Image (cartoon, rainbow, N blue to C red):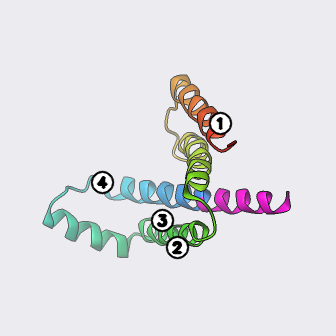
Amino acid sequence: MARIFSQHLQIFLVAAGAVVGQVLIKQGLRDDGIISFSLPGLVVLLKEIFTNSRLFTGCAISVISSILWLTLLSKMDLSYAAPMWSAFYFILLLVFSSWVLNEHVSAWRWSGTLLMMAGIWSLTRG
């Protein structure tokens, strides 16, 4: 039982890291405006990553979260870990988007996410 709790906690922490990274990236992009998908846009984005503390921190947290994810996958079945990560990620993303970014999250998004989580929960039961 303690092993399962530890695995779930680790997956939760990786998902939380991914969400925090994404929220910081979004906040940093709000500071700097729209980035175009082009060579000049890439140059601007790289400059912004290294001069905007939110973008830099968000990217760094995302990289650390990805490395931790790799370590988890080396110990766990992907078919178990990925759905659990997704469930945590989806709910945390809606909460952070609503509370931190002040985005409007409709009842449809909440209900859709809860429906996905129910499906994910059933995937992890077997």
Select label 3 or label 1 by which is in front: 1
Report the quarter where the C terminus lies.
top right
Instruction: Identify the residue position indicated by label 1 in the image.
Output: 122
Q: Picture quarter containing residue 76? A: bottom right
Dividing the picture into quarters, in which one does residue 53 lie? bottom left
**Marks 1 and 2, how far apart at CA:** 27 Å
Eye-nearest disc, 3 or 4: 3
Q: Residue 3: horizontal and vertical position, in percent?
A: 80, 63
Query: Mark 3 = which residue?
Result: 58
Q: Is 17 or 120 nearer to us in this picture?
A: 120
Q: Position of residue 124 (x, y in %)?
A: 65, 45
Give neighbour class at mark 4: few <14, some 14-19, many 20+ (Cα, 10 Å).
few
Q: Earlier in the sequence, mark 4 or mark 2?
A: 4
Residues in magenta, as a range:
1-14
Q: Which residue is mark 4?
A: 33
Q: Are marks 4 and 2 in contact (CB under 8 Å)?
A: no
| Residue 67: numbered disc | 2
